[in-house]
Amino acid sequence: MTTTQPTTQPTAQPTTQPTAQPTAQPATQPALQATAPATLEPAAPASTRSTRALLTCAVLTTPVFGVVSLAQAFTREGFDLLRHPLSMLSTGDLGWLQIANFLITAVLTVAGAIGLRRAMRGTPGGTWAPRLLLVEGAGLAAAGLFVMDPGDGFPAGTPMGAPAGMSWHAMLHMAAGSVAFTALIAACFVLGRHFARAGRGGHAVASRLGGLALLLGNAWAMSGGRAGSLTLCVGVLVAMAWVSVVAAARRADLAPRL
């Protein structure tokens, strides 16, 4: 007898696959905020900006005094730089140009001295170099207010040779000029010490050479040496130029960093 085996296959249970994709929640993006354009240079503190402005005055002393003085020296009739000091440009009809030049340079020198005092605070020479430059500025102002006497053919039409006598204002001019030159010479040597202590030998040598140029140029002029007015002019401009270079370097050190 044949036994019949049931052939019923187990019914496959349908598996329900979820087809619905989760609904994406809209991500809320924060609204873009308008931003100020980035500046190329960060704002410097007000004290730093004012110090840089004062140092700019020190930088300008040499070009202002040198350009105005030499422009007159080469254009005013009768003036000979080999015989006439730059101070004699304060005489004559156009003398007001050199008087103004002295006074403006004095103001720039005093402002620059204040800037250097701030920039060099706490360093060797940081007190006395600016003080000496203040004295120089005061001397330049006095030299501008008290003018020399005409002489030796200048202004044009003046008899040749030195004046028979010296007026009171000419004597005050000479005294003021001596004070200004002495202070500038001393300031250069103090700056030499400042740079030597900082280990900057080249700057120390340049500072002392600037002071020495004025010292020798003035001494040669006062001794009546040949072309003494020219050596004095060179010495003054060299010493002033070095102070301007120092001020420019200090100003650059205070520039904002990107």
Image (spheres, helix red, strand yellow):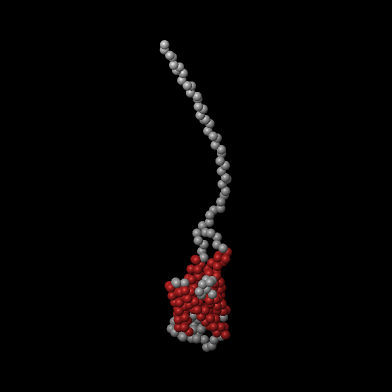
Image location (x, y in percent) of residue 186: 50, 79
Q: Residue furthest front?
A: 1
Quarter assignment of residue 176: bottom right
Quarter assignment of residue 95: bottom right
* Closest to the observer, 151 or 14: 14
Q: How many marks?
A: 0
Q: Residue furthest bottom?
A: 164
**Left or right, 81 with reference to 27:** left
Q: Residue at x 45, y 81 (%)?
A: 216
Q: Is residue 148 visible?
A: no
Image location (x, y in percent) of residue 22: 54, 34
Image location (x, y in percent) of residue 72: 50, 75
Q: Residue at x 48, y 86 (%)?
A: 161
From what the image shows, is residue 102 above or below residue 31?
Answer: below
Q: Residue at x 47, y 76 (%)?
A: 193
Image location (x, y in percent) of residue 26: 56, 39
Q: Is residue 246 visible?
A: yes
Q: Residue furthest top?
A: 1
Q: Residue at x 52, y 73 (%)?
A: 126
* Closest to the observer, 21 or 165: 21
Quarter of the figure with the N terminus: top left
